[in-house]
């Protein structure tokens, strides 16, 4: 798989992908317990950018408290700056599609020219909302994602 990395600008994955596919382990992070070591992520992101020349390295961060309740955030690195997003405490209805909505939200925001921090916040919010919806599709609107990014986590119906 590493031979394909020369064609990648934005590397999106999680700690298991980094370790099992690319051979980078983020410090003492323990995915089973949800104990995350952010400095370890920064270290491997720096190594990945040095080795592969990625424009961005991005990882979703799941803090597993139970099968139904998780902390959800992400981090991004652009070769200079490392940024960790806001964390959402989510009650999971369906995890299927959560990673896809994260990647889709990030790519959409980056293609629109949003700064990296704003793009990451959009992606994390889109994915957090997707975790609350049954099925494989993220059925929320852009306005709902942007409201959550803006701090409105009330869940009130918007009409």
Image (cartoon, grey):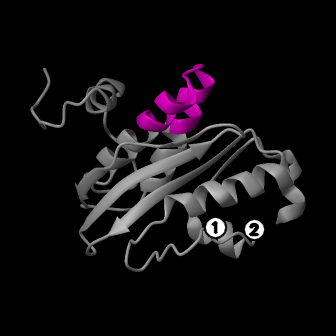
**Residue 44: which numbered mark, if any?**
none
Answer whether labels 2 and 1 touch (C-beta < 8 Å).
yes
Quarter of the view holding residue 79 = top right
Q: Residue at x 24, y 61 (%)?
A: 93
Within 10 Å of disc 2 (Cα), the crowding (few <14, some 14-19, many 20+) is few
Point out the stretch of residues depicted in magenta. Answer: 106-122
Q: Residue at x 79, y 46 (%)?
A: 8
Q: Residue at x 45, y 58 (%)?
A: 61
Quadrant placement of the N terminus: bottom right
Q: Secondary structure at mark 2?
A: loop
**Residue 22: which numbered mark, if any?**
2
x, y percentage for residue 4?
86, 56
Q: Is residue 13 visible?
A: no
Q: Main secondary structure of the magenta part?
A: helix
x, y percentage for residue 127?
39, 47
Give above or below for 136 relative to 125.
below
Q: Which residue is mark 1?
A: 17
x, y percentage for residue 113?
60, 19
* 26 relative position to 84: left or right: right
What's the CA distance linking mark 2 and mark 1?
A: 7 Å
């Amino acid at each position: 798989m590493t031979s394909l990395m020369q064609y990648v600008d934005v590397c999106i994955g999680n700690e298991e992908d980094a370790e099992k596919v690319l051979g980078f382990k983020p410090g003492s992070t323990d995915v089973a317990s949800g104990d995350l070591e952010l400095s370890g992520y920064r270290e491997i992101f720096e190594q990945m950018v040095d080795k592969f020349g990625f424009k961005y390295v991005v990882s979703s961060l799941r803090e597993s408290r139970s099968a139904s309740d998780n902390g959800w955030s992400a981090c991004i690195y652009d070769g200079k700056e490392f940024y960790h997003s806001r964390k959402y405490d989510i009650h999971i209805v369906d995890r299927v599609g959560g990673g896809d909505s994260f990647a889709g939200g990030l790519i959409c925001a980056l293609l629109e020219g949003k700064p990296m921090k704003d793009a990451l916040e959009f992606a994390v919010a889109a994915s957090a909302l997707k975790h609350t919806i049954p099925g494989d599709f993220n059925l929320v609107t852009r306005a709902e994602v942007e409201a959550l990014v803006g701090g409105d986590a009330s869940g009130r119906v918007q009409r």
